[in-house]
Amino acid sequence: MDIKFAHFNFNVLDLKRSMDFYDRALGLKEVRRKEGDGFTLVYLGDGRTSFELELTWLHDRKKPYDLGESEFHLAFTADDFNAAHKLHSEMGCICFENEAMGIYFIEDPDGYWLEIVPVR
């Protein structure tokens, strides 16, 4: 048996807004999509790894998702950490910094946290 990681999912309220955010903040592009009855799935990729982030948009959903205590996140490495930090500062999406650890987090339009770490 060979089981491999496939993707991770975030549910979003505004698909275009989320796709624009992930493109601008992290360079993630649409890899594929699936349209269904009342929902759209869009898979984003970085063009270098096989990891995909699935954005699920339930067309009739109007209420923000309850993310609990937000004790989960995705992490991304940045080869130019300072340039990434500058971009995210300009976007106003940095929600937490830990300078002692040399990391920070950005928040997407739906409240999901994304960790940015330098390439080590």
Image (spheres, rainbow, N blue to C red):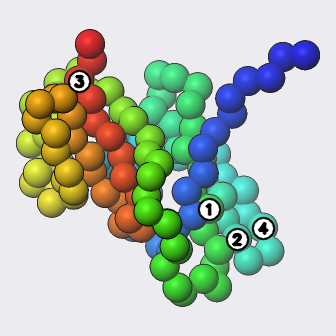
Camera-near label (2 vs 3) is: 3
Residue labelled with disc 3: 118
The vertical placement of 111 against 85, above or below, is below
Find the distance from the CA under tag 1 to the CA under tag 3.
29 Å
Find the distance from the CA under tag 2 to the CA under tag 3.
35 Å
Q: Nearer the viewer, residue 81 or 18?
A: 81
Find the distance from the CA under tag 2 to the CA under tag 4.
5 Å
> Label 1's element?
strand
**Residue 29 locus on image (x, y percent):** 46, 43
Image mark for residue 36: 4
Q: Is residue 31 visible?
A: no
Q: Is residue 97 left or right of residue 65?
A: left
Camera-near label (3 vs 4) is: 3
**Residue 7 locus on image (x, y percent):** 64, 39
Q: Residue at x 44, y 52 (%)?
A: 71
The vertical placement of 46 against 41, above or below, is above
Q: Is residue 80 visible?
A: yes
Mark closer to the chain start, 3 or 4:
4
